[in-house]
Image (cartoon, coloured by chain):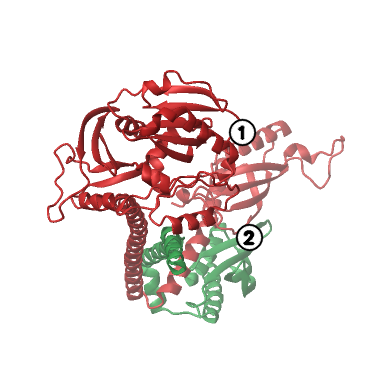
Amino acid sequence: MKRVLYVCADGARWMRFNKGELVDALEESVSFDKPIPYKPSHAINSISNDVHLLVDCEQTEIDIHPLLQLGASWRNQSNNSALKNKLASQFPDAIVRSAPKKTLLNAVFVQHINIPPAIRRWLAHVERSAITVCSISTVDEVVAERWGSIEDSLVITASSKFLRHTFCQSGHAVFTRAVGLAHETNFVSELTQTLAHLKSTGLIQQAVQAYFVGVPDRLVSDFPSIELISHSTVVPIESDTTEIFLAQQLLSAKFLQTNSRYRHVSHMLQKFLQRRARKKQIGHRVLFGVLVVLSLGFTALNEWQRVNEHREFTARKTELRMAIAMNQEEAVELSPQAAVMSGALLEKISIESAQGISPAILLTILGDVFTQYRKLELQELSWAVSSLEPSSSDAAANQTIVNLAGSIFLGESLRDQQQVFNEFTTYLEKFSELSHLVVLQTPLMQFNGSSSIDPSELIGNPKFRLQFNLNRYLGNET
Amino acid sequence: MRLKQFSVIAFSIGLVSLPLWSLRDGHSEQWARDVRELKTQRLHSARALDILKDHSVVIESVGNRPASVESLTLSLIENIKLSAINLEAKITQLSVVESEEVGKNTLIVEFNAVVNRAIDLLALFDAIREVADWRPMQVRRCTLVRETEAARLRAVCTIQVYYFLGIDS
């Protein structure tokens, strides 16, 4: 539901529209008794008090302050600020609207209406009933936006008392003139006069479109062709009055949404703007507040996590230090030189893990072998531990390289001696500690390949030499 | 107006930079390293304690019979000679020398002996073991040669006995 308040010197008309259709209308006088507060009717007093104000003027006002004085020259390339200042001094209560792109229009347009004091007082009186306006528009603006946006046009509107000639360019009213209805017989000549003035000021150079809004049929039915009017259009009014029709046009006007931006605000509009600004401000403040809360919350969370982490680490470190101190205390109770002693014992374990095979085991193995093969005599035995690096596994320690030299006391053939030797080496290889058995000399090797025999060697006691590795396993220590 | 603008800008910068500052690299890594080091120390201390508990006999021996390198050297020589006499073995050469190998302190015992049987050689090793006590001992190399005429064995051996500074002062 949208509300429009139409005011002029005659009075005020409240109008309610629903989807562009008039629902109800109420006429009021703008005079009031001061002591009595304004009582809005039930039609006005609803949940939302935002009202669109549509201001019209009397003929006398137009005659006094036309948009462009009849006979005055039109000055182009006006300076925006200078013109505003001039108008502000000439019309201190003017509603000023300037074109957003003055280069298109070659000038700054001013649509000024001085709200008469009586109407102003009445509006203030109404405002005390908590009714506020959300936009202020003039009839000239509505006319210009509706029929003067696309092309230059001359709009002739009719009210109950006078006809208004409004020349529009690019959606702005540039010139307006009021002609009393008493002169309606001179309708065409007055119109021609208006066009001549516009041409003389240079505002129009060629014929323009003409619109007749609310003009009685009797005036337009046999409208003659005029040189500076290219085409005329009669706009039908379905509403009872021109004011209602203009109010409907206002509600569909595109500029309505941004109307308040260009206004020197009245006290009524100011309340609406303040409320809107307050809402925006509240919105901004809420958003800002949320950002502050999020920022501080995020920071606080991270810092809290950091503090917790530190606390946990400190507790853990204390726990570990206490455990270390307890161990050290207990160790000192066992030995006053606990640190040195434990180090020495660790080293001892490391050394012992890397040692070669025990001589006792070595001799036991050899004793077993030579007991099995008594025909072989051991004459030289040597062993050496290969390295003393600590072993990394329990499987094997350092190797012991063993060299054996002996002779075979066997009176049989060389073949039998070799066979016995082979059996001996085979038996030796069965020991798991033994590896890399290398036969350096066998009974057969005593011959140098010729039929001659080394006289220093007795064929009956051939020598043998062996080399092998013995590995120590921790499991075989027993 | 300028002051207000400046305040707004400063506040906005603060609002953005505060959360970013809270994401700074803290001391977490350092703390984690400290905890890891302490855990390692604890393991070491626990291990040292276990070793001391497992070697109480050694601790007692060290406490009751403190030794020095010189006393070890003399004891080795004396014991080898005594053992040789008991075994009716002949020691033709005997030396005990301090040595350091791969960061370990050792006494190198070298002897040339003539023994009746191989088992007598083991008895000589046992004599060295008796002096070494808990200290590690290693027969580094040994050569046994049978003397056919005398029916005896000539032994040339090198034995390492490890000692520990701080205990064997």
Q: Colour of chain A?
A: red
- Check disc 1 and report its element: helix, strand or loop: loop
- Check disc 2 and report its element: helix, strand or loop: strand
Asked if residue A256 is positioned above or below residue B129 in the image, the reply reads above
- Amino acid type, residue under disc 1 in the picture: Gln
Q: Residue at x 51, y 34 (%)?
A: A193
Asked if residue A251 is positioned above or below residue A136 in the image, the reply reads above
Q: B4 left or right of A133?
A: right
The residue furthest top is A222
Residue A166 locus on image (x, y percent): 46, 36
Residue A225 can be seen, yes or no: yes
Dot 1, how many residues are within 10 Å of its Cα: few (below 14), some (14-19), or many (20+)?
few
Q: Which chain is green?
A: B
- Amino acid type, residue under disc 2 in the picture: Arg
Asked if residue A107 is positioned above or below residue B120 in the image, the reply reads above
Q: Which residue is mark 2?
A: B141
Looking at the rendered structure, the number of numbered marks drawn on it comes to 2
Dot 2, how many residues are within 10 Å of its Cα: few (below 14), some (14-19), or many (20+)?
many
Q: Residue at x 43, y 50 (%)?
A: A96
Q: Which residue is mark 1?
A: A205
For the N terminus of chain A, the quadrant is: top left
Q: Disc 1 vs disc 2: Cβ atoms closer than 8 Å?
A: no
Task: Please tell me in which quadrant of the rendered image residue A134 appears.
Answer: top left
Task: Please tell me in which quadrant of the rendered image residue A311 appears.
Answer: bottom left
